[in-house]
Image (cartoon, helix red, strand yellow):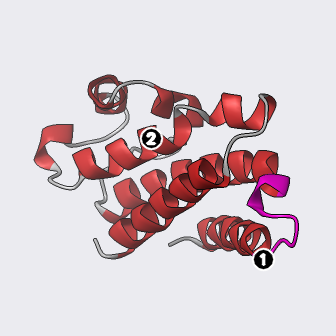
Amino acid sequence: MTEQSNKIIEEVLDEINSALNEVKGIVAHQRRLAFSLSLGTATLLEEYLKKKNILKPGIKINHLWLKKSVQNIKKLLESKITASPESLPQLNSILEKAHLIEKERDKIAYGKLITEKELNEKINLFIELKKEVENV
């Protein structure tokens, strides 16, 4: 991972740990978690594509793309990578997790409080995504 990506992921993990250790519960960190998990997810996808050496130079992954369906994300990526999305066996799994994290980002960031269970699910998805990208 690049130094910048490492710093971003470290910051996201710090926010997760801070939320999990919060006396008031993780819901007190809901909005910060929404933004952090979104940034971390886009960063992990970008790192995955860089590890596969297929991300075109200068391309940054936009978190808004990840709200779309997995098929539509793949269509968007086609012009930004040098291989077919179908040639990447792990891409579906990575995009599914990224989509699940991102699809309710705005509701979590700007809406009313959600349950600890829902936040924990997002955190767990992010941790799974991180492990999957690291093990490529």
As measured in the structure, the alpha-carbon distance from the residue carrying label 2 to the one carrying label 1 is 24 Å
Q: Which residue position is annotated with label 1?
A: 21
Left or right, 81 with respect to 88, comes to right
Q: Is residue 27 magenta?
A: yes
**Residue 47: percent from left, percent from top:** 45, 60
Task: Please tell me whether mark 2 or mark 1 is closer to you in this view.
Answer: 1
Q: Determine if residue 84 is in view.
A: no
Q: Residues within 10 Å of mark 2 (few under 14, many from 20)?
A: some
- The residue range painted magenta reads 21-28
Q: Name the image quarter holding the C terminus.
A: bottom left
| Relative image position of residue 81 (x, y in whole percent) | 32, 40
Q: Disc 2 marks which residue?
A: 100
Of 114 and 103, nearer the camera is 114
User: Left or right: where does residue 84 sit relative to residue 31?
Assistant: left
Looking at the image, which is closer to me, 65 or 57?
65
Residue type (three-letter) at the residue carrying disc 1: Asn
SS type, badge 1: loop
